[in-house]
Amino acid sequence: MCANPIMADDGPIMNPKSTILVTGGAGFIGSGYVRKSLQDHPDWAIRVLDALTYAGNRANLEGIEDQITFIHGDIADPGVVDDAVAGCDAVLNFAAESHVDRSLMDRRPFERTNVEGTQVLLDAAIQHGVERFLQVSTDEVYGDLGGTDHYSIETDPLLPRSPYAASKAAAEELVQTAHASHGLHTVLTRGSNTYGPRQFPEKIIPLFVTNAIDDRSLPIYGRGTAVRDYLHVEDHCGGIDLILHHGEPGGIYNLGARLEISACDIAEAILEALDKPHALMSFVADRPNHDQRYAVNPTAAESLGWSRAWSLEDGLQDTVAWYAANECWWRPIRSSQAFKDFEHAWYNRDR
């Protein structure tokens, strides 16, 4: 896709020898994007900035660290960010606190990273004349679509209902303001629930897979009727890359798979893939103010040429197989005291 510079009215946006900064590049989606970029854009100079908090993992970059420049630091630290952004043609902000459950327990890390950190990055991008800034956001900013057949479109109002979603909505406003006030060439993506290899095992699919491997119960909120649209990480990264190159300045793009499924059905599919009994399904206290449905209309991204490649059936099989073959990746995480403490605190709440 990058054989030649992509032109806009104001000149070239990206070229084959760009220097890019990927924040949160040791996380789940960020590391997936780094790996994709090394394949698709071999002449890019890629910098990864990551604070390596609980979900950031150097193991996610195993085998490619000699092909990137890794910077250990916090996106809310102006000194670190200024050095990381200097000389970059593009900044892609994947860095975020991203778990709704954790935001309900303590909103402060979400405000610091997702809001303050985004502003620090924007300030540096403006200061250094970065050509393009891509903000990775979420479909959760739209709020709950439960009881409707509506699919969120980019012009819908933002109605976040958790501290996590509110912090991501606030970050979006800062990005849009930087475009309007300073002329920064920004684009925003709002992705649906993403899954695949190397996802931190507190999220529903890796949690259910790793629990099932160990014959532990799968904790399903409420009656398990909440619906999400599941997007494979490779498809998500492909959409982000396309929008980085072809998105309109100030543009917002939904990335969704059009594959809605309930938590119960996800649990059943995982148990069947691992040949485990459905008796492992266990219903726990529902998440407070639990949104019952998210679903986005990705027509704008599709009009640029994006489409998903993974079916949910094939994607789940691929993901289950990865976790089954890579216990050395997830067992140290799950055996840590911090993970055990969170799991105990959250799933042992009163109904």
Image (cartoon, helix red, strand yellow):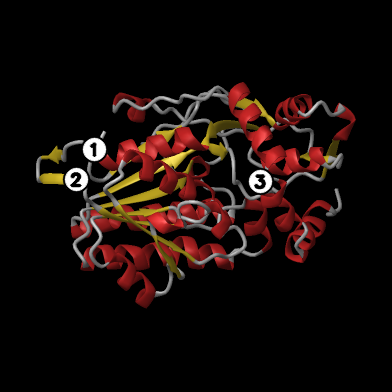
Q: Nearer the viewer, mark 1 or mark 3?
A: 1
> Where does the image place residue 312, in percent across and percent down from the top left?
59, 24
Given the current orientation, which residue lies at the most extreme left position? 10
Label 1: which residue?
Answer: 2
**Mark 2 / mark 1, whichever is N-terminal:** 1
Which residue type carries mark 3?
A: Lys
Q: CA distance from mark 1 to mark 3?
A: 33 Å
User: Would residue 80 appear left or right of 106 to someone viewing this image?
Assistant: left
Label 2: which residue?
Answer: 15
> Where does the image place residue 206, in percent across and percent down from the top left?
68, 42
Circles 1 and 3: CB atoms closer than 8 Å: no
For the residue pair 155 and 134, the one nearer the viewer reads as 134
Quadrant where the N terminus is found in the figure:
top left
Q: CA distance from mark 2 to mark 1?
A: 7 Å
Residue found 34% across the figure and 40% down from its top: 241
Label 3: which residue?
Answer: 203
> Where does the image place residue 185, in percent across and percent down from the top left?
22, 51
Residue found 54% across the figure and 62% down from its top: 110
Which residue type carries mark 1?
A: Cys
Given the current orientation, which residue lies at the most extreme right position? 279
- Tell me where residue 184 sits by quadrant: bottom left
Residue found 62% across the figure and 62% down from its top: 54
Given the current orientation, which residue lies at the most extreme bottom position? 79
> Where does the image place residue 136, in percent across and percent down from the top left?
42, 48
Q: CA distance from mark 2 to mark 3?
A: 36 Å
Circles 2 and 1: CB atoms closer than 8 Å: yes
Residue 56 appearing in the image:
no
Indicate the secondary structure of the residue bearing disc 3.
loop
